[in-house]
Image (cartoon, rainbow, N blue to C red):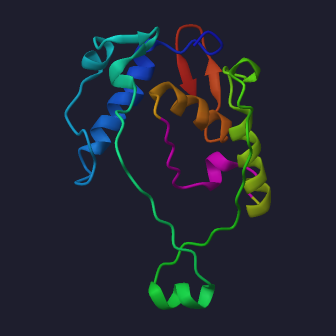
Amino acid sequence: MERYGITEEQTAKVAAKNYKNALKNPRAKNVKKISIKDIQNSEVLSWPIKRLEVARMTDAACVLILASEEVAKRLTDKPVWITGVGWCSGTSYIESRDLSSSPYIRAAAQHAYNMAGIKHPAKEIDVAEIYDTYAYKELKYCEALGLCAMVRREDSLTTE
C-alpha cells in the first residue's frame, strides 16, 4: 500500500468484484451480494485486511486433462494448447520473504513466457485467472505477471 499508494477502498473493490463474479457461478460457495461498503465495514483481522477481503475456507478441486494433440482433437473441436509453463519456489522462512512484491510469481511467469514466446503479456494474454485467499494479493500478482503496471499517481493508483 505504501509503495503504490493503494487504498483500502481499492482492495475492497477487488473483493467486491470477486463476490459479484461468484454470483454468476452456480457451483460457487459462500455466494452472496456484498458491497464495497460491507467489505470496508467488516471486522479488521490485521490492519488493513478486513474479514470480507479473505476468502472463506472451502473444499474445491480443479481438474486439468492433458492429452496428445491427436487425442485432444478427438475430444473437442476447441482444444487449448499449453505453450509454456513456469514454476518457482519461495522460502519457507517468513523472515526471509519479500512481502512487498512477488518475485516467485514474476520468476515463474517469466519462465512460462519465455517458453511460450510471450514478450508483452498484457497485450498477448486474453484470459488469466488470478487466485489468492487475500484480495490485496490479486493486485500484486497482476503486476508480477506483467498483466498491468502499477503506477503511483498523486492521489490514485492506476494500471497501465
Residue 30 pos. (x, y %): 25, 38
Give, as a single range, the part of the protein colored magenta: 118-132
Q: How many marks?
A: 0
Could you tell me which residue is drawn at 57 percent across and 13 percent down?
Answer: 1
Could you tell me which residue is drawn at 52 percent across and 78 percent down?
Answer: 79
Front-most of residues 91 and 25? 91
Quadrant in the picture for the C terminus: top right
Residue 65 pos. (x, y %): 52, 73
Side of 110 relative to 41 (left or right): right
Q: Quadrant of residue 76?
A: bottom left
Front-most of residues 105 and 21? 105
Residue 63 pos. (x, y %): 46, 65
Residue 108 in magenta stretch: no
54 up-or-down from 61: above or below: above
Q: Can residue 47 be spotted in the picture? A: yes
Could you tell me which residue is drawn at 27 percent across and 44 percent down?
Answer: 29
Could you tell me which residue is drawn at 67 percent across and 36 percent down?
Answer: 144
Q: Main secondary structure of the magenta part?
A: loop
Q: Quadrant of residue 157?
A: top right
Residue 38 pos. (x, y %): 25, 18
